């Protein structure tokens, strides 16, 4: 992409120059949306084709409530005249962008493609740093997440810790102020939202715990959480066997980078400004990265569930439900099943159930017994199509795969499979 941009740079500059030299110079001097859009339509006809990206569209409509109606009028005229102008409207507020598709919107029916862009998954993210081992890749996923911009800054000639110190923990690092900029740009009360994010990053996963830790009125929490969910910063979790009306909800930070900032950088800002970032990974991150259930172990579970989704045809070819977790109603962490998916429906329903072990020792029969015991607590004597065990350090020699047991190592999780990327 960059190479192509350099190759055609002079041609692109020429087109931009011609754009400003259209009759009357109206593109360059337009002061309102209508003449600007009409001039762009003329430019499209002059050039043969033109695509224009309008970013942060929700903010523009708030500053000018007539923009949608103006667009409706102009697009109608463009369609009548056959002018080859394509408008791409972008915005980070999902609910407001979705509102453009509703019947009440002036732009209803005008869109021919609607995309929601998500962070890259773990294999796509790994492609940015091919020199790193599977363990390093999972650590990178834990602290950097899957946003392409963050991943493009990584240098796999040095370790994950060196990159995190350079980019995030260093007060002059490219991503040191990223979370603050994001909250200030997207939210009207950034301090309140930051307190909620901090509470969730510290393991407060239930509404009552968040209210207490963040110090906000109970009546306000839902409003704040919905906004954070809309921005993809917080994610609600419920057991895959829960009814839609179930109240046993838990919350987690959906963006690993935001989570790592609140977990490892924000509590130590004063020390980082005084002492710098050198050695900060060893002091602040490494001691808990592999032991904190919300850090690398949680990433390992996420990666395992994504792997199951990619390889579902190995286990089941029919109808199946969401791939998620089974959560104990009482909130006991030990009774959770890390991977769960209902196969089929009704009385013919079976289950795919798994346990993830992010430990340095090979997994033995104890993990399988724990998985089966927890399954009995949740599902009683339900039929299980396949048991799955995921292990960072492999498996004990006495534990071997069987028709109803699939063993998956970290190396296998990160092994690209043809046709699946």
Image (cartoon, rainbow, N blue to C red):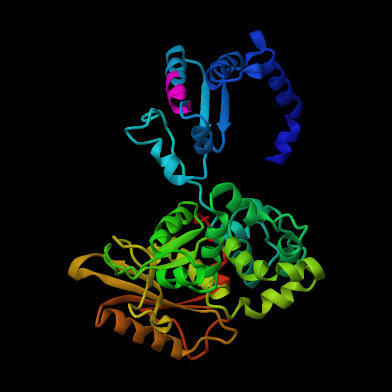
The quadrant of the rendering that contains the N terminus is top right
User: Would you say 226 lies left or right of 130 here?
Assistant: left
Magenta region, residue range:
67-73
Q: Which residue: 67% across, 61% down?
A: 130
- Residue 303 x %, y %: 51, 67
Q: Is residue 414 visible?
A: yes
Query: In the shown orientation, is residue 126 left or right of residue 210?
Result: right
In the rendered view, does 318 fall on the left or right side of 38?
A: left
Q: 212 or 235: which is nearer to us?
A: 212
Q: Is residue 68 magenta?
A: yes
Q: Position of residue 243 (x, y in %)?
A: 26, 66
Q: Position of residue 200 (x, y in %)?
A: 51, 68
Residue at image location 42% in from the left, 31% down from the top: 111
Residue in the image at 52% along x and 84% along y: 395
Q: Is residue 136 above or below residue 189?
A: below
Percent x, y of residue 387: 38, 78
Q: Residue furthest left?
A: 347
Taking depth in this image into account, of 187 and 170 the one nearest to the observer is 187
Q: Is residue 411 magenta?
A: no
Res 307 seen here: no
Query: What residue do we see at 42% from left, 18% from top?
Result: 76
Q: Of helix, strand and loop, which mostly describes the magenta segment?
A: helix
Residue extending farthest to the top is 23
- Image position of 241 with respect to 15: above or below: below
């Amino acid at each position: 992409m960059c190479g192509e941009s350099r190759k055609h740079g002079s041609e692109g500059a020429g087109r931009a120059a011609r754009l400003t030299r259209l009759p009357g110079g109206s593109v360059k001097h337009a002061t309102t949306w209508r003449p600007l859009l009409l001039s762009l339509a003329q430019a499209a006809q002059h050039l043969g084709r033109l695509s224009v990206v309008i970013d942060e569209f929700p903010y523009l409509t708030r500053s000018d409530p007539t923009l949608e109606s103006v667009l409706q009028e102009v697009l109608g005229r463009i369609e009548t005249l056959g002018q080859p102008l394509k408008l791409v409207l972008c915005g980070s507020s999902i609910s407001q962008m979705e509102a453009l598709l509703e019947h009440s919107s002036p732009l209803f029916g005008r869109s021919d493609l609607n995309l929601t862009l998500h962070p890259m998954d773990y294999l796509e993210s790994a492609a940015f740093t091919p020199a790193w081992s599977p363990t390093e890749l999972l650590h990178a996923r834990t602290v950097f997440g899957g946003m392409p911009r963050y991943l493009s800054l990584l240098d796999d000639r040095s370790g994950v810790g060196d990159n995190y110190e350079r980019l995030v923990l260093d007060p002059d690092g490219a991503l040191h102020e990223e979370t603050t900029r994001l909250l200030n740009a997207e939210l009207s009360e950034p301090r309140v939202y930051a307190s909620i994010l901090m509470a969730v990053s510290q393991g407060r996963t239930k509404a009552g715990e968040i209210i207490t830790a963040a110090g906000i009125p109970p009546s306000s929490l839902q409003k704040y959480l919905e906004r954070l969910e809309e921005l993809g910063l917080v994610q609600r979790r419920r057991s895959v066997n829960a009814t839609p009306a179930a109240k046993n909800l838990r919350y987690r930070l959906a963006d690993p980078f935001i989570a790592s900032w609140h977990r490892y950088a924000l509590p130590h800002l004063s020390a980082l400004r005084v002492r710098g970032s050198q050695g900060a990974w060893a002091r602040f991150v490494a001691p808990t990265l592999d032991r904190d259930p919300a850090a690398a172990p949680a990433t390992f579970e996420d990666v395992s569930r994504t792997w199951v989704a990619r390889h579902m045809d190995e286990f089941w070819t029919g109808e199946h439900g969401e791939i998620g977790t089974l959560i104990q109603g009482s909130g006991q962490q030990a009774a959770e099943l890390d991977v769960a998916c209902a196969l089929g429906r009704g009385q013919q329903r079976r289950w795919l159930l798994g346990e993830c072990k992010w430990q340095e020792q090979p997994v033995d029969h104890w993990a399988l017994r724990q998985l089966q015991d927890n399954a009995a607590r949740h599902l009683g004597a339900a039929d299980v199509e396949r048991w799955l065990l995921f292990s960072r350090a492999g498996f004990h020699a006495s534990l071997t795969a069987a028709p109803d047991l699939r063993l998956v190592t970290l190396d296998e999780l990160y092994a690209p499979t043809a046709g699946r990327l």
